[in-house]
Image (cartoon, rainbow, N blue to C red):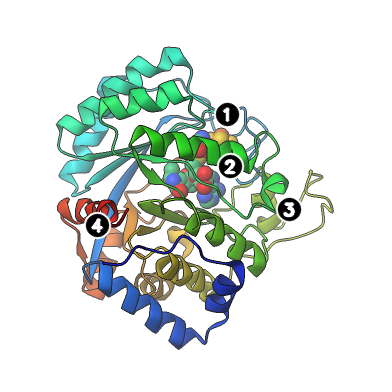
Amino acid sequence: MTDPRTDWTRPEIAALFDLPFDELMFQAQTVHRAHHAASQIQLCTLLSIKTGGCAEDCGYCAQSVKADAGVKATKLMDVRAVLQAAAQAKDAGSQRFCMGAAWRNPKDRDMPAIVEIVQGVRAMGMETCMTLGMLTPKQADMLAEAGLDYYNHNIDTSPERYNEIITTRTMDDRLDTLAEVRRAGINVCSGGIVGMGETRADRVGFIHTLATLPKHPESVPINALVPVKGTVLGDRLIDTPTEDRLGDPTKKISKIDDIEFVRTIAVARITMPLSMVRLSAGRESMTEACQALAFMAGANSIFTGDKLLTTANAGDDADAALLAKLGLRAMTAEEPLRACKAMEVVA
Ligand code: SAM
Ligand code: DTB
Ligand code: SF4
């Protein structure tokens, strides 16, 4: 197997976006089938283990202290309650349990409970993923020692647009944590959000940043903005823009065009052939046809269950019906591990 390229240029990525749609889909399917089992979708479950009251000002997020989205701030969940939720997810057929905390970074005093959670979920035979914000080298090592399989830390958008969306940290802060996660030996999950009013060039820059990391993330979540009332970006999409830091408060953003969304998935698949590409937030308001195209474009992972972190998700019944209609089946736990092993072989 040849090494996946990490030397993509922006013009090359822009040229992929510009392909005729049928050609782009053909290339994406060809790459997908060369590296992944066809017709198999990984099912992941999300749990918010610490909700709201986050010090960061991410313009899309309902959990920021700057948002007025009616999200109640909670403390870190009790270890036993997290393990109970993980057991339920396992019974529902999920292979990966992803736990999110609305933190800028975990405090050292939070780490013993986090370590206990990772160990407990792993002992159930599920893959573990955590997203806790920025990490110190010591925290990354503690998570690795606890056996954490994946760490999610999204770059979210292009380097050029980053400080319009978030002012309380930089893209470089994000890249530093990703490097620490890699160094500690934890698999990387990193992607972002489209539909935040960005340009095609921003989407090119976003994919370029991921596809030129020293090693591609093992998981690449592509979220479509879930517009939440009371957040800067949600209000702009819902059509109630208020005075905010993004300049002209009357500037609206529209929901991303379905075809452009699918193109983004296809370009992620082609440029990061071995990665699991996750069709993440935003499925609840997506048509079945758009989701089907996203799977054809190479997405092979979804979040199941009724809830993401604070917003609604499509729900198990809707997902089971969609997968059945499309003849797709849930991946066994071994498949994503096989994909990771393939990445180790070529690294
Ligand atoms: N605080 C941690 C962090 O930011 O890394 C972890 C939790 S944070 C909610 C995880 C990711 O969820 C964000 O990086 C963003 O990509 C995604 N997200 C948050 N709100 C979203 C929204 N309204 N629509 C789509 N994606 C969203
Ligand atoms: C990711 O890229 N998407 C997930 C997960 N990683 C942590 C989170 C989506 C959150 C959607 C908004 C909400 O529910 O608050
Ligand atoms: Fe905090 Fe994460 Fe939400 Fe940003 S995306 S406000 S860091 S919870």
Distance of label 4 from label 3 (alpha carbons): 47 Å
Residue at 35 percent of width and 48 percent of height: 306
Of badges 3 and 1, the one in the foreground is 1
**First reached walking from the N terminus: tag 3 or tag 1:** 1
Q: Amino acid at mark 2?
A: Cys
Give the residue pinned by disc 1. 54
Figure check: 268 above or below 83: below
In depth, the one of 302 and 207 nearer the eye is 207
x and y, in percent, of residue 190 in the image: 45, 48
Q: Is residue 185 above or below residue 317?
A: above
At label 1, the amino acid type is Cys
Residue at image mark 2: 61
SS for dot 1: loop
Residue type, mark 3 in image = Thr
Name the front one of labels 4 and 3. Answer: 4
Give the mark nearer the N terminus: 2 vs 4: 2
Q: Which residue is mark 3?
A: 240
Q: Identify the element where label 4 is drawn.
A: helix
Query: Foreground: 326 or 166?
Result: 166
Question: Nearer the N terminus, badge 2 or badge 1?
Answer: 1
How far is the residue under mark 3 from the one under mark 2? 16 Å
Q: Which mark is residue 342?
A: 4
